[in-house]
Amino acid sequence: MSEFINRYDADRDRSWSALIDGNIVASISIDGIDAAGKGAHLRWFIAAEAARGRGIGGRLINLALDFCRQRQYERIYLHTFKGLEAAQRLYESVGFRLVETESGEQWGTRVEEQRYEARL
């Protein structure tokens, strides 16, 4: 994330955070550095337990998609892990489709990494 912050360009990149009672409970970012190539990269989409079930994730992902449309990005992608069903349902509800699954290791644990893409 520090690399992203150091090269942040407001014309192509964006980050949003949601607050409850002054505390950050969710965030999402668009990294547009390779939007013309691989597509815009949706990154760091995370929500604390306090944010779940309140529609906050849906609002954040729609802000990110609207930003990408305004920038006329043709494609957006994200990486996640198999087993995050609520996130998967949200991604699919806004037009993302699973395009790749690969076994890997993260933090010493075997995981199924997934790549989702959406055409805008």
Image (spheres, helix red, strand yellow):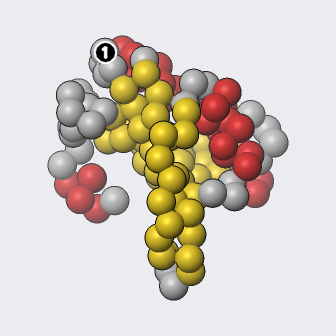
The residue where tag 1 is placed is 72
Residue shown at 20% from the left, 28% from the top: 36
Please name the amino acid that badge 1 sits on.
Gln
Q: Nearer the viewer, residue 53 or 83?
A: 83
Q: Nearer the viewer, residue 6 or 61?
A: 61
Quadrant of the rendered image containing residue 89: top right
Picture quadrant of residue 95: top right
Q: Is residue 5 above or below residue 64?
A: below
Dot 1 crowding, Cα within 10 Å, few <14, some 14–19, many 20+: few
Give the side of residue 106 with respect to residue 50, left or right: left
In the orientation shown, which residue stands out farthest toward the right? Answer: 53
Q: Quadrant of the N terminus?
A: bottom left
| Residue located at (67% from left, 36% from top) | 90
Q: Position of residue 110 (x, y in %)?
A: 56, 76
Is residue 25 in sight in this rendering? no
* In front of the other: 9 or 96: 96
Residue 95 as seen in the image, left or right of residue 1: right
